[in-house]
Structures are given as structure tokens and as C-alpha cells.
Amino acid sequence: MYRVILLSIFFCMPIFAEDSAAADTKSEAKERFYFTFRHNDNDKYFTGWMDPRAFISRFYVTHNFDWEDALMSRNPAAYDAWDFDGAAALMYGRVATELYIFRMKSFGIGVGAAVDIPLVARKQPATLNLYNVMGQIAAFIDVYLPYQMKLRITPMFHESVHIADGYRGDNSDFGIISYEFAALELYKYYKGFTFYGGVEATYSAPSERVLAFRGHLGFDYRYNIWREINFITGINMAMLYDKTLTRHPEAEGWHPAVNFGVGIEFDRLITAFKMSFQRGFESVTYHYAQMQAGLEVAVFY
């Protein structure tokens, strides 16, 4: 079922339309649209660039300051355990987009989909190893409010390894991921700033990744340099709460997460220096906080 939905999202031919709004009326769309991707002159101002939940395609080449504690200290005898011998770089790929099924001036209904792909590059032999590919899919309703504001209601956000057909890591850990949550987010654009915040609560978690609640705040700031070229900076701060875990008590309770970036935006493409402190993206390292820094390329589509 998930494969059918993903194929529908990525291969459906959109009906392209003109950009939906001018720079001074970013929260309004001119007409009615069906099956359209993001309208760049409008929608990027109502998307949290540094929000790791956002459906933005990314490629993050990073130095992980916590490799030894978060990744290499795991049980080396575990089946298919992480192996970082000869590792040269840690990279995260994310292929993601949003598709509006129906969109008007005041509201829109759409779906989002993403696949997260952690990679390890090695010097000798020169290879790329793939770990813990996970998929996400969500259904959302956008309500465009006065004063350049947008409310996003997400009744269903599903994340699991089953969407991406597999994982690699310790089966006895958090290797198998599957859960659903609902979310509510509010965005406000004001003179180059995008302020946003939201909450999410899990209502189904059959796997052992038992994130119960997440609250986050953030902002992006864009300063126009020339035409479609902007200086951009942004930060996202979050607090996450996990239910009691029997195997990993260190993952219980509240945990912070911070993502910060500064770079240059070329229309839909952003090249930036990024720093992050959060749990691992890989399911088997979810219960370890990690400090990372590196170069990220993001694309809004």
C-alpha cells in the first residue's frame, strides 16, 4: 500500500501554474490548483528550513563528533552491526517533496513523502555503505490566514522502515521503526523572517521507537542579495519526550534537539553550513544524542 502511495506522489504529473503570490502577499494563492508541487515564491516562506520534519530534499556531508559514543560503542558482536573501520565521511541523503491534491486561496489539502538515506563513505576500499533507510508519508491540511500566516494540520504522519523496504543494524535495538503521530504547526512571515512552531503527539507506536511528544520553535531569515539570490540563516529548537524504555533507560524522558544553518539561497537551492545536536536519524542510533557539523545542500520542490 505504501509503495502505491509513494509512486503516486513522485510520478503523478502535476498541473504547473504560475507562482502563487508576490513577495508582499506570500500567504495568498491567486487561483484554484490541482496536483501541484510547491509554489516557490510563496511556500518556501511557510516551511521551516531547519526543521528536520520538513519535506525538503537534503544532502548533508557531516562530521559526527560523537561517532565513538553514539555509533562505534555498540555491541560489535550484534548481527550486521555498524562498522566504521576506514570511514572517511558520514552523509545523510533525504529525498522529499509535497504535493497539493487540491489548493485554493484560503486552504489546501496535500500529501508529503520522504526517504531518509544514511551513508558511510570509506577510503579503502572506496565504497559507500547504506544504513537504515527509512520512509515517511503524511497527509495535511493548510489553512491560509490573514496577516501572512499559515496553519498546518497533519492528522496522519507515518514513519517506518517498511516504506523504504529495510534497515541495517542491530535487530535487538531500534532497528525496526513504525509509528504514527498527529501535528499542528503555525507559520508567520514578517519582513524577511519566517517564524514557526508546533507540537506533535504519537497515537500509534507498535515499534520500540516510542517518541510520545515533540514541541518545536524556529525561524528563518532571508536577506536579498540580487534577484533570486538570498542570504539565509535559520534555527530549529525542539524538546522531545520518550515513553519508558526497558532496554535503553538513557532514552527516557525529555531530550533537546537543535539545528542551525547559514548559507546562500539560489531560488530553490540552498547551500549552507549546518550544525545539529539531536538523536540519530538512523533507527539503531535513535537513543544517542549526536553533535554534527558540515555542509548541506537543500532543494525546495
Image (tube, rainbow, N blue to C red):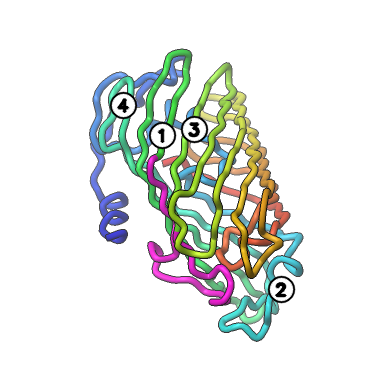
Q: Position of residue 226 (x, y in %)?
A: 57, 25
Q: Quadrant of residue 122?
A: bottom right
Residue on which disc 4 sits: 18
Q: Residue at x 52, y 68 (%)?
A: 132
**Viewer-proximal residue among 152 and 234:** 152
Q: Which mark is residue 185?
A: 3
Residue on which disc 2 sits: 72
**Viewer-proximal residue among 102 and 214:** 214
In magenta segment, residue 82: no
User: Disc 4 versus disc 3: distance between alpha carbons?
Assistant: 26 Å
Q: Residue at x 60, y 27 (%)?
A: 222
Left or right? Give the position of 164 relative to 230. Answer: left
Q: Earlier in the sequence, mark 1 or mark 2?
A: 2
User: Disc 4 versus disc 2: distance between alpha carbons?
Assistant: 50 Å
Q: Nearer the viewer, mark 4 or mark 2?
A: 2
Secondary structure, mark 3, is strand
Q: Nearer the viewer, mark 4 or mark 3?
A: 3
User: Disc 3 versus disc 2: distance between alpha carbons?
Assistant: 36 Å
Q: Residues within 10 Å of mark 2 (few under 14, many from 20)?
A: some
Q: Position of residue 94 (x, y in %)?
A: 49, 54
Secondary structure, mark 1, is strand
Q: Are marks 1 and 2 in contact (CB under 8 Å)?
A: no
Q: Residue at x 62, y 47 (%)?
A: 240
Q: Nearer the viewer, mark 3 or mark 2?
A: 3
**Kind of residue sitting beneath label 2:** Met
Q: Residues within 10 Å of mark 4 (few under 14, many from 20)?
A: few
Q: Magenta stretch: dominant SS?
A: loop
- Where does the magenta region start and end? 155-178
